């Protein structure tokens, strides 16, 4: 499995920092992956939906630790890269 593209869309709120879309093998896209700032730092939450009983269930997710770690590493790297590309408030006001 190869992650061939990641796009990050910044969304500043309390804990939600961004959304990401990820393309696998130039053939399959997963949208609405969340980048969240939790108690232990940033983490990636896969897209989910709310069930009738109020619980949330992932729509798509990695099924082993190796895949999860690879996905999280690549998405968080792209998030950091996107942050550095954004103009600062100082640069915007000039």
Image: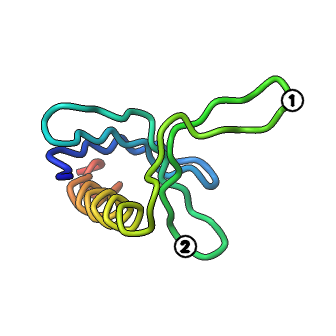
Label 2 element class:
strand
Which residue is tagged 1? 53
Residue 7, image x, y percentages = 26, 42
State the residue in front, 78 or 93. Answer: 78
Quadrant of the rendered image containing residue 50: top right
Where is 22 relative to 44, above or below? Answer: above
Where is 80 relative to 39, above or below? Answer: above
In this rendering, would 83 be left or right of 39?
left
Q: Tell me the residue at 15%/42% (across/down).
A: 25
Residue 67, image x, y percentages = 35, 61
Frontmost of labels 1 and 2 is: 1
Quadrant of the rendered image containing residue 54: top right
In this rendering, would 24 be left or right of 12?
left
Label 1 element class:
loop
Which residue is tagged 2? 41
Q: Are marks 1 and 2 in contact (CB under 8 Å)?
A: no
Residue 63, image x, y percentages = 46, 54
Between the C-alphas of marks 1 and 2, the distance is: 29 Å
Q: Earlier in the sequence, mark 1 or mark 2?
A: 2
Where is 29 relative to 64, above or below? Answer: above
Furthest residue toward front: 63
Residue 55, image x, y percentages = 79, 38
**Number of on-image labels:** 2
Furthest residue toward bottom: 40
Q: Tell me the residue at 49%/52% (across/down).
A: 17
State the residue in front, 92 or 11. Answer: 11
Furthest residue toward right: 53
């Amino acid at each position: 499995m190869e992650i061939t593209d990641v796009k990050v869309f910044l969304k500043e709120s309390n804990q939600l920092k961004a959304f990401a879309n990820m393309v696998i093998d130039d053939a399959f896209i997963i949208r609405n992956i969340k980048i969240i700032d939790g108690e232990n730092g940033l983490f990636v939450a896969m897209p989910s939906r709310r069930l009738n009983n109020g619980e949330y269930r992932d729509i798509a997710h990695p099924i082993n630790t190796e895949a999860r770690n690879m996905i999280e590493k690549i998405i968080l790297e792209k998030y950091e890269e996107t942050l550095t590309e954004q103009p600062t408030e100082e640069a915007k006001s000039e």
